[in-house]
Structures are given as structure tokens and as C-alpha cells.
Image: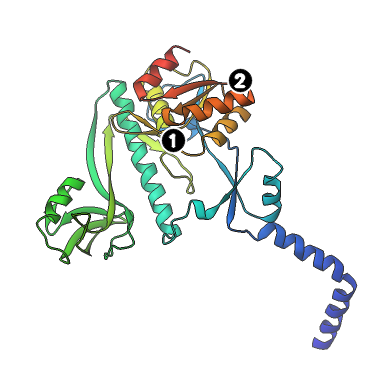
């Protein structure tokens, strides 16, 4: 029986070897990725489907997140990147931190998304003159440097240092200044919702006593309306902050600030309402144009690049330069 199967298989391969070789080559071409990505014009995500606000007002138009599309660096896509003007070939070495693993990158992206969403709520309610309360201000591990000797991880929320409660980087620094180099520091942290004990060894760098962590504060905001963010598992980052703030604001005030327009944009949002610049603006602008957006809101730091692309490509889209949230509201009012 085994011999018969072997003979049939050998015969099939002999009769079809050219087809099989071609099939394997094509399969490898489209599945094996080299150390590159291809960035292409993205698209829009309607925030009406991403953010739910209890008893929120409806709108005639829409606020939309913009995103960059990225394709794996397979050989056919790499070759196409040399032909299609709007496709850019990018080496992963340009964006990779050598010692950083994928889980850390994902964790940091989730921190960015959570932080910017809470900022968006606070800024929107502040602008609408509706009461809100910041109930938490969590000191969160954002990055662990290579030289750090600690079992802390990205995403850990630090609650106590050597038995002393801390809420800010200044609080932590004051505790560390009382210690000596090579001292073992004890941390009480929250990881995945559970309280744990972790440690770190103190060392000096540029005259400062440090553990080797980059920390950020993530707030929690309480309002009189329930607000729910419905993002996909692979969505993260802070670049949607401004547009999320506009969406929330438009749902809690009676006036429809969209004026029936399809409004796209990008930019981070800080707690004081200032708008931060982002990466990939040319792909986001091209995606907004492709999806026939009427307006593209772009951070001040990216505005000149967006304007240059608009004028070069003769795009029929209105640009708004975003410096802070109040200014963006005023510009939308004057469209």
C-alpha cells in the first residue's frame, strides 16, 4: 500500500513538476516578508461608530479618524513601491528599537490610546462648560531602558515606593533622592488589575538618581454621562485624540459643529487642550481626499507639509491648522 502511494506521488510530481515549482515560487513571493513595510494612503474611521455618549446629540455630518495603511514587505509589494508614487518603502530598522519586543510596543500603544481618550473627555467637557471630575492620576511605566535593573514592565501603575504613596514623577524623584546608588527600591504596583510587589536598583545618570524608567501619568475622568470607546484590538496610539475630543464635544452640546460636512483629521490632545503633531500626515491627507472628506484638520507641526502636498496635488479639500482645541472650534464655526 505504501509503495503504491509512493509511486503515484512520484509520478504526479514528475508530470507536474513545472507547475509545482511555479506555484511554490509564487507562494514564496506573496508570503515571505523582507525587513520592510510599504506605507500607502489610508482611510477614514467614522467616530460615530467608535464613541458612544449617553443621551448624546446626533449630527448631520461626521468626524473621522485618519490612518496610515501599511503592507508587508513582500517582493511584489516592494517592486510596486517603485512604480506607484504614493507608496513608500520603509525599512523596519528606521522605526525599531533594537531591544524592544512586540509586547512592549503593543502595551505602549494601549497606554497612548487610553491616555488620549481620557484627555479627550476632559477637554471636551471643559470646553462645553459641563462638570467633570478627574478621579485618578496613575503614574504609569511607559518605557524601561536597557540599563535598568528592575522587574517592572511597560503598563505597570506605580502606587507606592518604599512604602510612600506616589502620584507624579516629582513624588517619585523626591523619594529616590533620599536613597543611595545601588540601593534596592521596593515598588507596590498594579499589573493587569492585581496589586504586586516589584523592585529596582537605583543608579546615577547625569547627576540624577534613577531606576531607568520613562513614566507618564494617565488620568481617569468621571462625568454625568457614560462614554464608551469601541476600538478594535489592533487599534492604538494617541494620534486620534483631537478628533475624539471633537466627536465627544459635538455629542454633548446642542449645536452641530459638523454643519453636515465630512470632517477628517489627526493630532494628539493634551489635557490643556493643545494639539500635538503626528507622523504619516501625507498618507492621512491622501486617505482623506480619497474618501472625499470636505475638511482635513492637521496639527500645527504638520501643517506646512500638508499644505505643500495639497497645493502640489491640487486637492479640493479645506485645511485647518490645529494649535489648540478652542482655536479649532472657532475655525470650524467660521467655515
Front label number (1 vs 2): 2
Side of 205 relative to 313 (left or right): left
Which image quadrant: the N terminus?
bottom right
Which element carries disc 1, helix, strand or loop?
A: loop
Which image quadrant is residue 125 in? top left
**In this picture, is 11 found above or below 63?**
below
Residue closest to the far front = 206
Instruction: Judge by depth and name the residue closer to the eye, 214 or 293.
Output: 214
Q: CA distance from mark 1 to mark 2?
A: 23 Å
Mark 1 nearby-residue class (10 Å; few <14, some 14–19, many ≥20): many
Instruction: Give coordinates of residue 63: x percent, y percent.
Output: 48, 26
Which element carries disc 2, helix, strand or loop?
A: loop
Give the labeled residue for mark 2. 316
Instruction: Judge by depth and name the residue closer to the eye, 211 or 232.
Output: 211
* Residue at point 69%, 40% (across, down): 84
Which image quadrant is residue 256 in? top left
Side of 332 relative to 290 (left or right): left
Question: Which numbered disc, 1 or 2, marks the residue that appears first in the sequence?
Answer: 1
**In this picture, is 256 found above or below 165?**
above
Residue 44 visible in the shown view: no
Residue 253 visible in the shown view: yes
Instruction: Give coordinates of residue 140: x percent, y percent.
Output: 28, 50
Give the labeled residue for mark 1. 240
Amino acid at each position: 500500500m505504501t509503495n503504491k502511494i509512493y509511486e503515484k506521488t512520484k509520478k504526479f510530481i514528475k508530470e507536474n513538476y513545472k507547475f509545482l515549482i511555479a506555484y511554490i515560487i509564487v507562494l514564496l513571493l506573496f508570503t515571505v516578508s523582507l525587513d520592510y513595510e510599504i506605507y500607502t494612503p489610508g482611510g477614514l474611521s467614522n467616530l460615530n461608530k467608535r464613541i458612544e455618549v449617553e443621551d448624546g446629540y446626533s449630527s448631520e455630518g461626521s468626524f473621522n479618524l485618519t490612518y496610515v495603511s501599511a503592507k508587508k514587505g513582500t517582493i511584489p509589494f516592494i517592486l510596486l513601491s517603485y512604480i506607484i508614487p504614493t507608496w513608500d518603502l520603509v525599512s523596519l530598522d528606521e522605526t525599531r528599537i533594537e531591544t524592544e519586543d512586540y509586547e512592549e510596543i503593543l502595551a505602549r500603544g494601549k497606554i497612548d490610546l487610553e491616555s488620549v481618550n481620557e484627555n479627550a473627555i476632559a477637554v471636551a467637557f471643559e470646553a462645553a462648560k459641563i462638570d467633570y471630575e478627574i478621579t485618578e492620576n496613575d503614574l504609569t511605566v511607559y518605557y524601561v531602558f536597557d540599563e535598568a535593573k528592575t522587574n517592572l514592565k511597560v503598563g505597570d501603575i506605580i502606587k507606592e515606593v518604599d512604602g510612600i504613596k506616589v502620584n507624579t514623577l516629582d513624588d517619585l524623584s523626591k523619594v529616590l533622592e533620599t536613597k543611595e546608588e545601588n540601593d534596592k527600591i521596593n515598588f507596590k504596583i498594579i499589573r493587569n488589575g492585581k496589586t504586586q510587589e516589584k523592585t529596582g536598583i537605583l543608579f546615577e545618570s547625569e547627576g540624577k538618581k534613577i531606576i531607568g524608567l520613562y513614566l507618564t501619568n494617565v488620568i481617569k475622568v468621571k462625568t454625568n454621562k457614560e462614554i464608551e470607546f469601541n476600538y478594535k484590538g489592533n487599534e492604538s496610539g494617541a494620534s486620534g485624540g483631537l478628533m475624539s475630543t471633537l466627536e465627544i464635544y459635538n455629542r454633548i452640546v446642542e449645536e452641530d459643529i459638523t454643519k453636515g460636512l465630512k470632517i477628517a483629521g489627526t493630532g494628539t490632545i493634551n489635557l490643556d487642550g493643545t494639539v500635538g503633531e503626528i507622523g504619516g500626515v501625507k498618507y492621512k491627507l491622501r486617505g482623506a481626499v480619497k474618501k472625499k472628506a470636505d475638511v482635513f484638520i492637521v496639527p500645527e507641526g504638520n501643517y506646512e507639509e500638508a499644505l505643500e502636498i495639497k497645493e502640489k496635488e491640487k486637492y479640493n479639500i479645506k485645511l485647518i491648522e490645529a494649535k489648540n482645541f478652542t482655536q479649532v472650534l472657532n475655525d470650524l464655526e467660521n467655515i
